[in-house]
Amino acid sequence: MTRVKLISAWFGGALLLAGAVGILESGAADVFLEATRPDFQKISLGVAEIANTGGSDWLAGRIEEVLKHDVRRSLVFDLVDLPGLGIQMADVRNGKGAGSKAVFKQAAEKGVSVLVWGTATWKAVGDQSDVNMEGFVYDSGSDEVVGGKRYAGSPSVVRQMAHRFADELVFRYTGEPGIARTKIAYVAQQGTARELFVMDYDGYDTRQLTADGFLNLMPQWSPDRRFLIFTAYRNRNAQDIDMIELATGKRWTVISFGGLNITPALSPDGNFLAFASSYEGNSELYRLDTRTKAIQRLTVNPSGDFSPSWSPNGRELVFVSDRGGGPQLFLMSSDGSNVRRLTFEGDYNAAPVWSPRGNWIAYVCRTHREYKLCIISPDGQKRMQLTTGPGVDDSPSWSPDGRHLAFSSTADGKSHIYMIDADGKGRERLTFQGTHNSAPSWSPAS
């Protein structure tokens, strides 16, 4: 069994908090920045070497590598090359003395706002091993070491230590949770079946969740990250909506009407489940009250309606309907009223997903016979195509900070999972195994 113990220590005090994880605290006032402003200036941050203080040679290097990638992906920080600026970090790693003060001053003069460094130790305890990591932070604005974190656990959670420290940095400077400890659920081909998997947001630590030899598709997270809800095709005549608990693997059926039951989506508070079903004829949208089990039909239309996605406040749904001919995006209130069409450009627009901040809706658009990702504002006034190039891009899913999208693409021949920044930059492939990986769903923040 994996042993995980987290110990947080604040500099300037003797208090040790076992199992606590908070923001980096100090006497200096916290700085909160609105990272979604168009004129947002990234914070220059340098990561010094994570020094090995005992144990395996790879340990500190692995932590440093993961931390740097997390910092870069956060889009909050501008990761600077400290050696390239002529900054020597040996004294900084000691965290004390005149030497470190001189380096702090040098970094500030070079425009580096934040310096991060640390240590890593591997200790054998009987037949088990413990890893200890300490991370330190210097802020040039306050000209002081503003905080530090200490983590301890088994070697299997080394990457999680780095992720956790990265999230602490993001939280300190934005007041928002970081995404380094988030997960991405997805579908992967297993023989003739398609099963559910989950991985870290950077593509590591993959874990298979289902293994029943059927088609398990379209996973979506519960708001508390404990469950996935998805469509299970057990045979041609039975397409149910199931739920699985990640910690235990316990699984049960939520919707089992006759006909097709697909595209489930839980409301932000978890009180309602929107889904499409054909049990009354053509595909219509329904809403299940997860507390009372009451079901309300939301759409009444001879055309097909499917793929609902909730607004962040839970008051509206965006969905797909072919009532205008080809599939287009429509909006409606969460009770089914006030239906209006959102997209008018192009003859194919599908798979919508509302951004966590509510300012964009991402979807699959067809442009010049190519399926790519687009975003549109909920009022329909702004629209932008995010992806270009070869292959089919499909199934967008927002990161909980709204700064990234996960999606599937056949750009490299086979279907794999990718990450992209919300402005269309920073494309990064996340899966490399198997012949088919699709339908990513990004978890809420931890």
Image: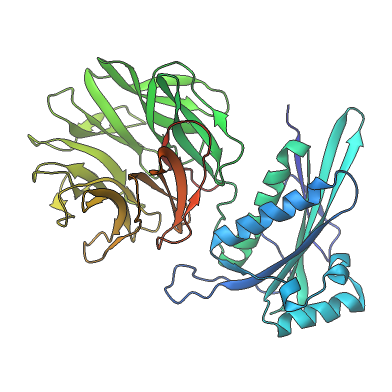
Residue ranking furthest to the bottom:
109
Residue 388: percent from left, percent from top: 34, 56
Q: Is residue 45 shown to the viewer in this render? A: yes
Say which of 263 and 418 sits in front: 418
Residue 67 placement (x, y as % from top left): 68, 55
For the N terminus, give its image quadrant: top right
* Residue 149 picture location, percent across and down: 76, 56
Quadrant in the rendering for residue 230: top left
Quarter location, residue 360 = bottom left
The image shows residue 148, relative to residue 337, as above or below, that is: below
Above or below, 259 against 110 in this view is above
Residue 196 is situated, as x and y percent measured from the top left of the image, at: 46, 28
Q: Is residue 139 visible?
A: no
Q: Residue at x 17, y 33 (%)?
A: 284
**Colour basis:** rainbow
**Residue under the image location 53 percent in, 29 percent down:** 246
Left or right relative to 215: residue 351: left
With respect to residue 329, does 51 lie above or below? below
Q: Is residue 57 left or right of residue 71?
A: right
Along the horizontal axis of the image, is 63 left or right of 102? left
Counting labels gives 0
- Is 184 on the left-hand or right-hand side of 368? right
Q: Residue at x 13, y 41 (%)?
A: 322
Q: Nearer the viewer, residue 437 or 237?
A: 437
